[in-house]
Image (cartoon, grey):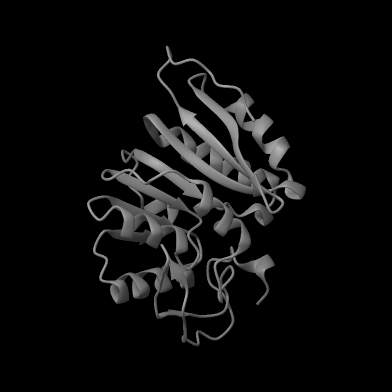
């Protein structure tokens, strides 16, 4: 299965588990992976850029990894903030299975791996970190972000990594136009052909900062 189909709910390829050794927070771990998911053998370049440019994770509350894949963002959040609840959300059932297996290997009890519809509607998030699934198409991507970004707690931030040549600048403009008035989107970092966008849910009295 190619990466173009990592957003399938039920991958058709055989579920063959194999070990791999990703590095999370500077430490190597022996986890398991399988085909039919996004970037199954490594932490992809976009996620690496995101993790290198986000601030320290909130120490508690609900944290969201939107489009979690096998879980590099999820596990970074969960290891950094053991008192937080990390929601690992994906439509790919195989990816969710791998997150659950690897969370058990890592001894993490603060990870909830689930489909989008299984997240309680009243949950609000102290932060959202995401390498969103750009290849699902513009309409699906817009629907995804329009649904989840307004669930940020006030004075909290979402951090999104988008490849420049896949529309990061136009997405930033769209977010500025579609989100509620108390949300502001700025470009937080540029690296390796990627943009890291910061979406802040601010108090209405909080001044708007300029994009870089």
Q: Is residue 21 above or below residue 78?
A: below
Q: Is residue 72 above or below residue 142?
A: below
Identity of the residue drawn at 32% across and 55% down: 80
Q: Residue 168: where, in percent of width, then height? A: 69, 42
Identity of the residue drawn at 48% across and 20% down: 182
* Residue found at the very far right of the displayed protein: 165
Q: Is residue 117 above or below residue 148?
A: below
Identity of the residue drawn at 27% across and 66% down: 108
Quarter of the image that includes the C terminus = top right
Q: Nearer the viewer, residue 138 or 105?
A: 105
* Residue found at the very far front of the displayed protein: 26
Position of 49 compared to 24: left or right?
right
Q: Nearer the viewer, residue 192 or 5?
A: 192
Q: Residue 131: where, in percent of width, then height? A: 56, 53
Q: Residue 62: where, in percent of width, then height? A: 31, 45
Picture mark count: 0
* Residue found at the very far top of the displayed protein: 205
Q: Residue 110: where, in percent of width, then height? A: 26, 59
Quarter of the image that includes the N terminus = bottom right
Position of 122 compared to 67: left or right?
left
Identity of the residue drawn at 60% across and 67% down: 6
């Amino acid at each position: 299965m190619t990466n173009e189909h990592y957003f399938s709910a039920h991958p058709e390829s055989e579920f063959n588990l194999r070990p791999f050794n990703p590095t999370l927070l500077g430490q190597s771990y022996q986890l398991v992976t399988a085909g039919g998911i996004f970037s199954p053998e490594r932490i992809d370049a976009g996620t690496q850029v995101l993790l290198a440019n986000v601030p320290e994770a909130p120490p508690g509350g609900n944290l969201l990894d939107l489009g979690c894949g096998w879980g590099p963002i999820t596990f970074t959040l969960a290891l950094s903030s053991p008192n937080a609840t990390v929601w690992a959300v994906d439509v790919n059932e195989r990816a969710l299975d791998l997150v659950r297996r690897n969370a058990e290997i890592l001894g993490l009890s603060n990870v909830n791996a689930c489909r989008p519809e299984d997240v309680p509607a009243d949950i609000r998030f102290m932060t959202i970190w995401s390498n969103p699934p750009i290849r699902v198409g513009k309409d699906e991507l817009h629907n995804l972000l329009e649904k989840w970004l307004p669930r940020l707690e006030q004075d909290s931030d979402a951090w999104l990594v988008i490849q420049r040549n896949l529309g990061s600048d136009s997405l930033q403009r769209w977010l500025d136009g579609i989100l509620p008035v108390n949300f502001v989107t700025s470009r937080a970092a540029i690296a390796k052909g990627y943009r890291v966008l910061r979406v802040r849910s601010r108090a209405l009295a909080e001044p708007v900062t300029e994009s870089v």
